[in-house]
Image: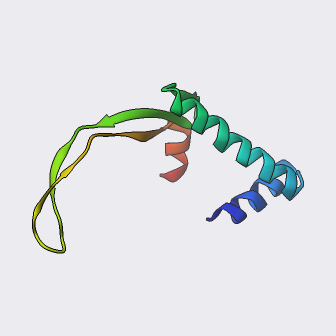
Amino acid sequence: MNKAQLIDAMATEAKLTKVDSKKALEAFINVVGKSLKKGERIGLVGFGSFSVGKRAARKGVNPQNGKEIKIPAKKVIKFKAGSDLAGKVK
């Protein structure tokens, strides 16, 4: 499902217009992004939680020439599905 299909599905499920659904989805994405940038954890009971983790610096291999490269440390976004969401996949 892509973003447009998600907006359509949200509009149908919540009986909203597509414009309102698009605004709601974009607002959700913006709020989550801003919160994660601050280092906050977002927990939605039953759905899941978003958090920021750290990936340590490591060595890798350039696939084009086989030379060793240094991959710098960085922050990564993590998502852990809640029990309700995970149960819908079974």
Going by the image, does 38 lie left or right of 13? Answer: left
Name the residue: 13% across, 73% down. Answer: 65
Foreground residue among 26 and 1: 26
Task: Find residue 63 and report its horizontal and vertical position in percent.
Answer: 18, 70
Residue occupying image coordinates x 69% and y 41%: 28
Q: Where residue 80 appears, x then y in whole percent?
A: 45, 38
Q: Is residue 13 visible?
A: no
- Do we see residue 62 in this rendering? yes
User: Which color mode does the image show?
Assistant: rainbow
Q: Viewer-proximal residue, 81 or 24?
A: 24
Quarter of the figure that contains the N terminus: bottom right
Residue under the image location 66 percent in, 61 percent down: 3
In the rendered structure, the answer to whether residue 58 lies left or right of residue 9 reads left
Q: Nearer the viewer, residue 40 or 59?
A: 59
Q: Is residue 40 left or right of residue 12?
A: left
Q: Is residue 47 above or below residue 17?
A: above
Q: Position of residue 35 (x, y in %)?
A: 58, 30
Q: Position of residue 73 (x, y in %)?
A: 27, 40
Dividing the picture into quadrants, the one containing residue 46 is top right
The residue lying toward the viewer, choosing from 34 and 19, is 34
Residue drawn at point x = 70 percent, y = 65 percent: 5
Left or right of residue 1, residue 55 in this image: left
Which residue is situated farthest in the left direction here? 67
